[in-house]
Amino acid sequence: MSVTIRQLGLGLLVLLGCLQLPMVSGLDTAALGKVAEVCVKESGISPEEKKVLLADEMEKIDEKDFSHNMRCFQLCFYKQLGIIDANGDPIVEPFIKFMESRFTDKKDKVKPAIAKCRAITDADPCEHVFKFEVCMAHAIEGN
C-alpha cells in the first residue's frame, strides 16, 4: 500500500504548518523553530530532507521514501512536544488534545483511533512512531 504523506494528514506537515500547535504545545512559533532545529541535528536529516520538511513539500514524498532520519525527526519533535514517550508510544491525554486540535471535525474518531493504533509495535522507536502515525491517519481519515 502506497500512501503519500499528504494523505497521511499527519506528520511533519502538521507539525510545522499547524497554526494551532502553539496552543496545544504551549510553545510559540520561535520556540517551535528551535525545537525543529534541535531535531534536525538529532535526527541527521539531510539538507534536502530539511528543505522538503520546512518548505511544506511533504506531498512530494511517498511513504516508502520517508527516510529513517525523517522518521526520527518526527519522533524527536513529538517527544519535544511532550505527546509521545521515548519509545514512540503516545502519552494519551496530551496526544488526544493534539489530535483533536488537528481534526476538529473528527474529534469523535481520535480516541477510537488511539485505542486501535496503540497496538502498533516496532523495536525501532522511529519506525514505531511512523507506523503509529500511518495507523492514526487511516483510522481518523477513513483511508
Image: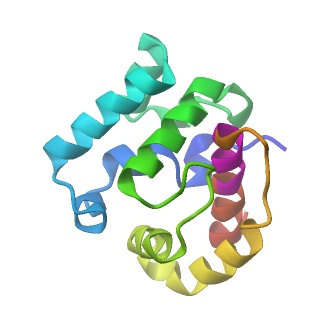
Extreme residue toward the bottom, this view: 108
Horizontal side of residue 97 vs 9, given as left or right = left
Q: Residue at x 68, y 82 (%)?
A: 112
The location of residue 116, given as percent across then percent down, is 76, 73
Q: Residue at x 47, y 69 (%)?
A: 99
Q: How is the image coloured?
A: rainbow
The location of residue 67, given as percent across then percent down, is 64, 25
The location of residue 132, given as percent across then percent down, is 68, 56
Extreme residue toward the right, this view: 1
* 92 falls in the magenta region: no
Q: Residue at x 30, y 61 (%)?
A: 25
Residue 55 seen by the camera: no
Q: Is residue 24 above or below residue 89?
A: below
In the picture, which quadrant includes the C terminus? bottom right
Horizontal side of residue 101 vs 23, given as left or right = right
Extreme residue toward the front, this view: 86
Residue 111: name its quadrant.
bottom right
Horizontal side of residue 53 vs 63, given as left or right = left
Q: Residue at x 42, y 78 (%)?
A: 104
* 130 falls in the magenta region: yes
Extreme residue toward the top, this view: 47
Q: Is residue 121 above or below residue 142?
A: above
What residue range appears in magenta?
A: 126-132
In the picture, which quadrant includes the N terminus? top right
142 and 107: which one is in front? 107
The location of residue 96, given as percent across then percent down, is 49, 75
Horizontal side of residue 138 vs 6, given as left or right = right
SS majority, magenta: helix
Q: Is residue 13 above or below residue 90?
A: above
